[in-house]
Amino acid sequence: MPFTPDSDLDLLFPANLISPEVKSQLHPDVHIRPLASTDHARGHLSVLSVLTVATDLGEAAWVSQFNAMRAAPKTYYSLVVVDKASDRIVGAGSLFVERKFLRGLGSVGHIEDIAVDKQQQGKKLGLRIIQALTYISESGGCYKTILNCSDDNIPFYIKCGFERKENEMAKYA
Ligand code: ACO
């Protein structure tokens, strides 16, 4: 499939929120942009499946979730890295902005669901995704950007400039 430019896509958030510095440092074979409404067909869920079981409920259900996210302004920022030769997604990541009553009505950026296709790991795509999401968080005024990860991924996030802080608790339904 030929590469689709941002101007031909229906994007989750404005493309100018992607850091120009990150774009300039990105591997030349790939492009970083906001998630688009047609990205189900570009393998978005396949890339996310490196994280956990990525159940596919079909394109219509996927688009409905995309639209629900876009209807909450300045809250959901999912981005993707696209291989220019194939127009397929090879990396993905999300930022969720939480508004607070504390910290002078401040906001916190939560990084979630970082995934790089197995064939493309080790090419700094994960680093660029984290840098791009952190840029959106900080330029949007978040006073901190946080995430949860396994012990195995701690060295990766330290290389991305994060530090270890407190513990994660979880209760699954
Ligand atoms: N342990 C040690 N160092 C690592 C690791 C690791 N597990 N992963 C990456 N690094 C290092 C790299 O060697 C590189 O170091 P360098 O700058 O000295 O060369 C640096 O971190 C940047 O690595 P990238 O090439 O950007 O990493 P990559 O593109 O492979 O992405 C990622 C890393 C996202 C963890 C990828 O391996 C992946 O998708 N793994 C499976 C899914 C996953 O675990 N996702 C993260 C879940 S946590 C969350 O979503 C908040």
Image (cartoon, rainbow, N blue to C red):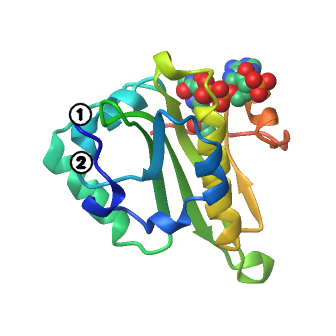
Quick check: 135 left or right of 64? Answer: right
Kindly identify the residue that appears in the image at 22 percent across and 53 percent down. Answer: 63
Q: Which mark is residue 56?
A: 1
Tag 1 and tag 2, C-beta contact below 8 Å: yes
Quadrant, the N terminus: top left
Dot 2: element: helix
Where is residue 166? Give x, y as percent.
83, 43
Where is residue 97? Give x, y as percent.
58, 65
Q: Quadrant of residue 57?
A: top left
Dot 1: element: loop
Disc 2 residue lies near ligand 1 with CB under 8 A: no
Kindly identify the residue that appears in the image at 33 percent across and 27 percent down. Answer: 46
Kindly identify the residue that appears in the image at 17 percent across and 44 percent down. Answer: 59
Quadrant, the C terminus: top left
Judging by the rendered image, the residue that carries numbered circle 2 is 62
Q: Amino acid at mark 1?
A: Asp
Kindly identify the residue that appears in the image at 19 percent across and 49 percent down. Answer: 61
Q: Amino acid at mark 2?
A: Trp
Q: Which mark is residue 138?
A: none
Query: Can residue 113 be seen?
Result: yes
Residue sticking out furthest to the bottom = 104
Closer to the camera, 166 or 70? 70
Q: Quadrant of residue 159?
A: top right
- Image quadrant, ligand 1: top right
Quick check: 80 left or right of 133? Answer: left
Label 2 packing within 10 angstroms: few (<14), some (14-19), many (20+):
some
Where is residue 60? Give x, y as percent.
14, 49
